[in-house]
Amino acid sequence: MSAGDVRGLLRRYDPGKLTVATIASHSSIQILLGAKREGLRTLALAPPGRGWFYSRMWFVDEVWEMDLRELPSAADRLLSMNAILVPHGSYVEYVGWRAALEMRVPTFGNRYLLEWEADQHRKMELLASAGLRTPRTYRSPEEVDGPVIVKLYGAKGGKGYFVARGVEELRDGLRGVDGPYIIQEYVVGVPAYHHFFYSPLRGRLELFGFDIRYESNVDGRTLGLAKPTFVVVGNVPLVLRESLLPGVQRDGESFASAVRERTGRPPIGPFSLESIIKDTLEIVYFEFSGRIVAGTSVYMVHGSPYSLMYFREPLDMGRRIAMEIREAAESGRLDEVVT
Ligand code: AMP
């Protein structure tokens, strides 16, 4: 969908009757609750067997239970509801990034970023082009001279990653691997996931908070019985040392500029930069997500403490998204917040 195509769709919209639609998974409770609290209609698109759970929530106006691979063929129904699709991690998982790029429904955020996110090498290149410190990427096992982490393309929620202490272990591990992967330097330190919101309406980048993922066999009580695995089970809130914040904000702004340069649009709405912070306090970025991350839900309802730097009331990310949509609709600027 080009920007012109999306503007064409918006011309038929009634901005006073928007519906926020999202897939019933990931961070959808936060997104739908935020939309309702901003006075918007809400629609949950549920995979088969999951609709009943969402139908019980007072802030969900409608639930469509469907095979989500069929979502593109529901575009006309969504358009007739003046729907704004809010993507999250499971959206791409269910629909596929190519279908998401072509989806004939105005989508909150910069959907062109999906293409960069789908390829581990391009992803790292975008981070590096923003001037951010990134882990070394090795082109072949022969180059490896320390601990590494191997990531399969399209691996979700850390599933299918493995760590090797050196080249021998790496060769062993790669024997079982099928499909494209990336070999990355394993950075020793603590993980921190940085949440940002870029507002095209206010022309600013808001630092929204941090979380840590709670991952099965690195955070679990493994008692030395299991190899490290990174399957995400939940998220935990985090505040960083305040002295780190100006650097974090600057890194976010550099990334936003790089996104604008590469895709022609700013990031739009929530995104996350995912890092390991070393004991030297250097921040090394190994990943980004060009949409809301599930870890923002740790601040649901009570709001992120950092949101108070910009607003008098604490806001969570779901409400922040809805606020941007509502304000864009009220000021005739919807085309600036959707792609
Ligand atoms: P991801 O699914 O890419 O967010 O990564 C899953 C987990 O792997 C993260 O939470 C990190 O703890 C860890 N991880 C990913 N890349 C690296 C890296 N280059 N060095 C150290 N840990 C990493």
Image (cartoon, rainbow, N blue to C red):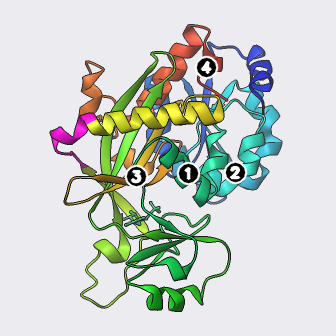
> Which amino acid type corresponds to the residue marked 1 in the rendered image?
Glu
Q: Which residue is mark 4?
A: 336
Q: Which residue is mark 2?
A: 97
Q: Tell me the mark number nearer the camera, choosing from 1 and 4.
A: 1
What is the quadrant of residue 222 in the picture? bottom left
Q: Which residue is mark 1?
A: 125
| Residue 28: percent from left, percent from top | 50, 44
Q: Residue at x 54, y 23 (%)?
A: 40
Quadrant location, the N terminus: top right
Q: CA distance from mark 1 to mark 2?
A: 19 Å
- Which segment is the magenta one? 238-246
Q: Secondary structure at mark 4?
A: helix
Q: Earlier in the sequence, mark 3 or mark 2?
A: 2
CB under 8 Å between callouts 2 and 4?
Answer: no
Q: Which residue is mark 3?
A: 274
| Residue 132: percent from left, percent from top | 41, 46
Query: Does label 2 point to a residue whose CB lies under 8 Å from ligand 1?
Result: no
Q: Secondary structure at mark 1?
A: helix
> Which amino acid type corresponds to the residue marked 3 in the rendered image?
Glu
Residue 76 in view: yes
